[in-house]
Amino acid sequence: MAAAATLFGMKPRDVERCRVLEIGCNQGGNLIPMAFGLPGSELVGIDLAPGAIARAQARIERMGLTNIRVHAMNLLDVVPEMGKFDYVIAHGVYSWVPAEVREKVLAVCRAHLNPNGVAYVSYNTYPAGYLRQVGRGAMQFHAGRVGARGEDSVRAGKSFLKFLADSLEDTNIGKAVYRDDFERQVKRKDGGIFHDELSENYTPFYFTEVAAAAGRHGLQFLSEAKLRDMLSPKIKPEALRMLNESVGNDMIAWQQYVDFLVFRGFRETLLCQGEVKLRRERLAERVAKMWVASPLRRFGEGGDGAIEFRMPRGKGNIRTNHPVTIAALDRLAGMWPRGERIEDLANAVADAPINLAGAMLSIVAMDLADLRTRRLEVAAEVSERPVASRMARVEAEEGDVITSLLHRSIQMEDRLARDFVRLLDGARDHAALVDALAAGHPEVARDTIDAQVRTNLLELCRSGVLAG
C-alpha cells in the first residue's frame, strides 16, 4: 500500500510508525503478523464474530504483543473516537455484506483516514462475476437439496460442479463454465469458499460502480494493490495501444476497459482522500528512492548473448542482454529475500539511478520483483544457528500455515516440517537440529532427516522465514 502510494506521488506514513485499522480481521491471520513485524506501529482490528476475536486475542497474548488491539464489534458501531489511521484494510468484506454496510466501509475510510492515508478494499467484479454467479447458484441449490450445512455444503457444491462439467457435451458452453469454476474452487480452502461463494450476500460490481461510490464519500482511486494491474496488465499490445488512444487520461474508464479485456473477476483496489493530488507521470524519479528485491536467478545464456533469469518454481522469467540489468539482477539474486535501495543498486552496477529505476519498474510490472519502502531485516543466508521468527514458530505449533517475514503464507505439509520450524530458535546448529528431529521422528531415517534439514533451511531462508 505504501509502495503504490509513493509511486503515484503521495507521501504515505512510514509503515514502521503508523496506525492500521483492519475491518473484518477474523482471527488476526493478517493483522497479528503485521503487529509482530512492525513493533513501532499501532494496529486495530474489528470483526463481528466474538469467537474469532477471542482466538485472535489468545494468540496476541501468547506472542506478548502490546501494539495491537482487537474488538468484537459491528462495523456500523465504529465511532469517531477510534481516531485516525494511516492504513485501512477491508479484505473480503465489500462484496459480501448488505448495502448499508458497504456504504459504512467507505464512510469509515473517509472519516478515519489521515490526509495521506491509504485504504485497501477488495471485491468481486464483472464481467467474470456473471459466470461465477452461475457456479454459485448451482452449488447453493445442490447443497440445499441434499441438506448439507457449513463446509459440508462446500464439498457437496464442488462435487456437483464436477458432475455438471463431466455431464455436458463438449459443444455446450456450460461445460466450460462449470469446468473453470470447479478448477478454480479445488485450489482454494473450503472455509474461503464457504465465506465467498456460499455466503448470504454476494455482489459483484463493475469497477466504475465502486469508483463512483468511493467518489460520493470523498475518496478517489489510487491504484490496484498489485502494481502489474496498473503498469502492465495482461493485454495484447495492439489492444493496449488502441485502448490508450481511445481513452486517453480517463483512468477510471481505462481501468474498466481493462476489466473487460482481461475478463476480471476480483479486484484489490487502493483508495485515498479525494483532495490528494496524484502524479501518474515520471514514475522512475520516485522509484529511484525506493527498495527493490527480486528472487530471479540466472538460468542460462542464449546464442545471442542474452541471459535468461527465472523465478523459483518457474513462475515467470525474463531474457535480457543489457549488461547493467544483468548485473543488477545478479546482485539482487545474491541478497534475496533482502532488497536494496535502487540508488545504491545503481551505484553498485555503475548506472544512473533514473535509468536503473526505469528498468526495475518494468520488472516490477511483470511481477518479477518487489517494490518496497523500507529495508527488511530478514536473513539472506543460513547462519550457523538459524532462527525462524517467533511468529512462525508459534504458528507452527498451532496449525499448518506459517507467515514469513515477507508477510506471505506458507503451507507446512506435514508434522516433521512444522516440528522443524519450531526448533529454529537459534539454540541449535545443523547437527543439533538433526539430532532433535531424529529423536522426535524415529520412523524417518537419519540420513533422510540430514538431507531434509539442509534443503529446508535453504528453502525457509529464500522464503523469508529466517530472521536476519
Image (spheres, rainbow, N blue to C red):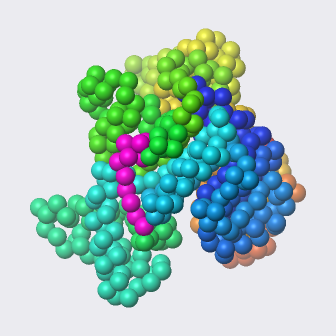
Image spot of residue 162 (x, y percent) = 29, 72
Residue 285 sits inside the magenta stretch: no
Image spot of residue 101 (x, y percent) = 51, 60
Count up the numbered dots: 0
Q: Is residue 191 left or right of residue 64?
A: left
Image spot of residue 107 (x, y percent) = 56, 50
Residue 138's place in the image compared with 111, above or below, is below
Residue projecting furthest to the right: 427
The residue lying at 68 percent from left, 15 percent from top is: 347
The residue lying at 33 percent from left, 23 percent from top is: 248
Q: Is residue 384 left or right of residue 168?
A: right
Residue 161's place in the image compared with 236, above or below, is below
Residue 163: quadrant of the picture: bottom left
Image spot of residue 374 (x, y percent) = 71, 34
The residue lying at 52 percent from left, 32 percent from top is: 364
Segment colored magenta: 201-212
Residue 467's place in the image compared with 434, above or below, is above
- 389 or 8: which is nearer to us? 8
- 62 or 396: which is nearer to us? 62
User: On the rendered image, what quadrant is the N terminus found in?
Assistant: top right
Q: Is residue 42 left or right of residue 298?
A: right
- 84 or 235: which is nearer to us? 84
Tell me, yes or no, if residue 246 can be seen here.
Answer: yes
User: On the rendered image, what quadrant is the C terminus found in?
Assistant: top right
Tell me, yes or no, if residue 414 can be seen here.
Answer: no
Residue projecting furthest to the bottom: 147
Residue 253's place in the image compared with 461, above or below, is above
